[in-house]
Image (spheres, rainbow, N blue to C red):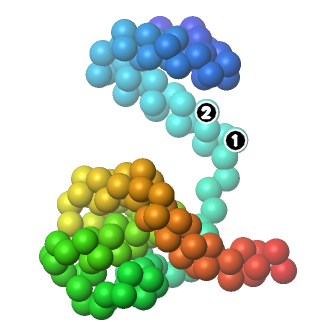
Amino acid sequence: MTEPLLADLIRAVAVDAADDVDQLLGALDAQQLRVLVVELAEQLADHVTVSHEFDYSPDQICSAATRLASGVFGVSVEAVRSRDRHRPVTDARAVAQAVARACGLTLSAIGAFFGQHHATVMYAIDKVATTPRLAAAAAQITDGLLAPQQADQAA
């Protein structure tokens, strides 16, 4: 059932035919979608090597991202970890969460560190992605965090 569909889906993705992809996926029920996802994951598992970018815990990564973001926005680390809703604090928190995500952490791990639901973290990351000044701050911090790791891998 899914073998021809999978081939059609791969062809549609390969030629960047978003309407065809939408049509193919829209015709599937929940069970068919689950089967398709499992089949795709099994195929990817044969071709993708998962690497762990850091030898740090999620809390260590979130702490570093929080410390750096708080410095960029001129707020305290404690404020970023709090429920404070003032703009500089929420911006710093969102950037720290986006940086942690860019470092490979799951939404749940980030949410656990900040005491937030993973959907709240998703919203913050989307806010960073769609706000140029926040995206620039996140890129600057991410580059700073990843540069030492990338230099170690190159050596």
Give the camera-side residue of 151 and 33.
151
Gap in angstroms between the C-alphas marked 1 and 2 = 7 Å
From the viewer's perspective, is 3 left or right of 85? right
Residue at horizontal 25 percent and vertical 81 percent from the top: 81
> Residues at badges 1 and 2 in contact (C-beta under 8 Å)?
yes
The answer to whether residue 6 is seen in the rendering is no
Residue at horizontal 40 percent and vertical 69 percent from the top: 95
Residue 49's place in the image compared with 71, above or below, is above
Q: Position of residue 109 (x, y in %)?
A: 34, 67
Query: What residue sits right under mark 2 in the picture?
Result: 43
Disc 1 is placed on an element classified as: loop
Report crowding for label 2: few under 14, some 14 to 19, many 20 or more residues within 10 A (C-alpha). few
Report crowding for label 1: few under 14, some 14 to 19, many 20 or more residues within 10 A (C-alpha). few
Residue at horizontal 72 percent and vertical 74 percent from the top: 150
Query: Which kind of residue does numbered mark 1 sit on?
Result: His
Disc 2 is placed on an element classified as: helix
